[in-house]
Image (spheres, helix red, strand yellow):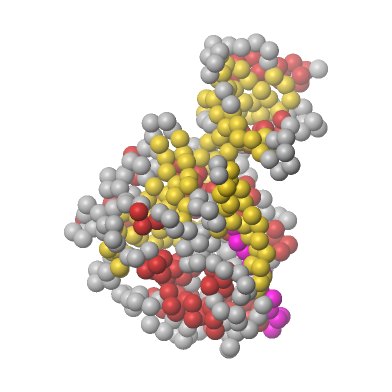
Amino acid sequence: MDLFNPIVPEERQHPHFRFMIQPDFCKPEIEVIKSWADGFIDRDHKFVKEFQTTFNSSFWELYLCACFKELGCTVDFSYETPDFVISSPYGDFIAEATTANEPDGFRPEWDKNVELLDQTSTEDILRLSTIRLSNAISKKYNKYINKYSKLSHVQNQPFVICVSPFDQPFFYFQDSLAIVRVLYAYEASLTVPGTEEGEFIFIGESRSFSVQKSPGVNIKLGLFTDDRMAEVSAIIFNNRATISKVRALAKEGSYPVIFMGSRIVQSGDMTGCQRFVAPRPNYQETILDGLHILINPLAKHPLDLKMFENREVAIHNYEPQTDRYFSEFPDGFLLQRICHAIVSKENTINFKRSLCEQPYQELPPETWAEDDLIYVGGHNGRFYKNHMAHYRGWTIVVFFDSISEEWNALTVKKLCYNIPQFMQANQDNSIASTDISEWFTTKEEAYAAIKQEIDNISQD
């Protein structure tokens, strides 16, 4: 399978492919990708064309093939579908690859420049990626139900969906936050500054049970918190499986590369992260670095996790009985990594020629219905059963005290869309806030009381 001999006209080549095949420019990187393809069989005779024209989905399949080999698995390519029929020392399983891509009319991942960073927020990245990952997983799940589950070599085997996001510029800043929202409806840990420099104290967690695609259209999250996808055993995910991964594994080439990022550091019962900056070839990375396996605790056919234990792999799971999400990150886990390739202007001419100057579509801003109290979950110390609402330009949080078993409420004069945003606004002295001194037996009473406070303030 000759991946890098062009078989499509230049104008149809993907920008990443066109960048890599410049004469004597990316030889070490090309050798890495060729090694990933060793043993990979093009069963429908379309793979090379797809690699050269759409790139990311084929790149992701080759990366997965290399990972399965590294994990001691054998792939049987004698079956037409699904993508990977796998034998391992810990049991057989089926794996299907997919990518989360940009919506039609949106900016593709390769069309980016530094100036875009100032216009991009992490929350915007997470919202779009959450939508696109949910869409990609749901499509593969439906394909399993309608097609794969009827195949004899698939039946009664664990089924794993392998997904990676390529849905927007700077998609790699999301780490694993979006996929955890999709599967476990988990948004973030809630922390406050400790007494020591750089210390943070865990006080609770924020949940996210839906994501707004457009006003009035919400996508339900938490696919692995109930049995709606019991046929899916796990999700494999790696947001570090990009061209930067190839550069990290390649020998020193014709241009300098600087790697920057952070790794998990485990010390006793303490967990932190250590930043790094290193040039190629001093920087070291493995094929598995940055890989996540996210388990469905309600799967009909559970996947044996032994092949992922004591490797460079993060393991995520959920406990239905306690509604608790948890994760295990090994010491040295690659949490974040980007690279800066120092190349001449001539080497980027063809790549920049692909950049589109026409306006792209964007997600509409998130908006909530006025005076609609919705459950957002999570907990902050002894307070839980959180509900949020927007009212007259204020954001209200109604919560339950687990000790007194009563309800109360807080509000800030800013539109917030999750508990972390609300906490940040409540700590900002320039933003008006208020509460109520009385406690109530129902959330409806607490909600009515805090709205009355807002009405009183608005009339003054």
Between 302 and 13, the one nearer to me in the picture? 302
On screen, residue 111 above or below 15: above
Between 175 and 315, the one nearer to me in the picture? 315
User: Residue 436's spot in the image, x, y percent?
Assistant: 68, 15
Residue extending farthest bottom: 23
User: Residue 330's spot in the image, x, y percent?
Assistant: 50, 52
Between 14 and 73, the one nearer to me in the picture? 73
Image quarter (top left, top right, bottom left or bottom right) of the C terminus = top right
Left or right: residue 94 compared with residue 52: left
Residue extending farthest left: 152
Q: Quadrant of residue 270?
A: top right
- The answer to whether residue 415 is visible is no
Image quarter (top left, top right, bottom left or bottom right) of the N terminus = bottom left
User: Residue 421's spot in the image, x, y percent?
Assistant: 66, 37
* Residue occupying the point 70% across, 81% down: 344
Q: Quadrant of residue 389?
A: top right
On screen, residue 27 above or below 277: below
Is residue 345 found inside the magenta-colored segment of the image? yes
> The magenta stretch spans which residues?
336-346
- The answer to whether residue 377 is visible is yes
* Residue occupying the point 66% across, 68% down: 278
Is residue 76 found inside the magenta-colored segment of the image? no
* Residue occupying the point 71% across, 43% down: 198
User: Residue 350's spot in the image, x, y percent?
Assistant: 63, 80
* Residue occupying the point 52% across, 25% down: 385
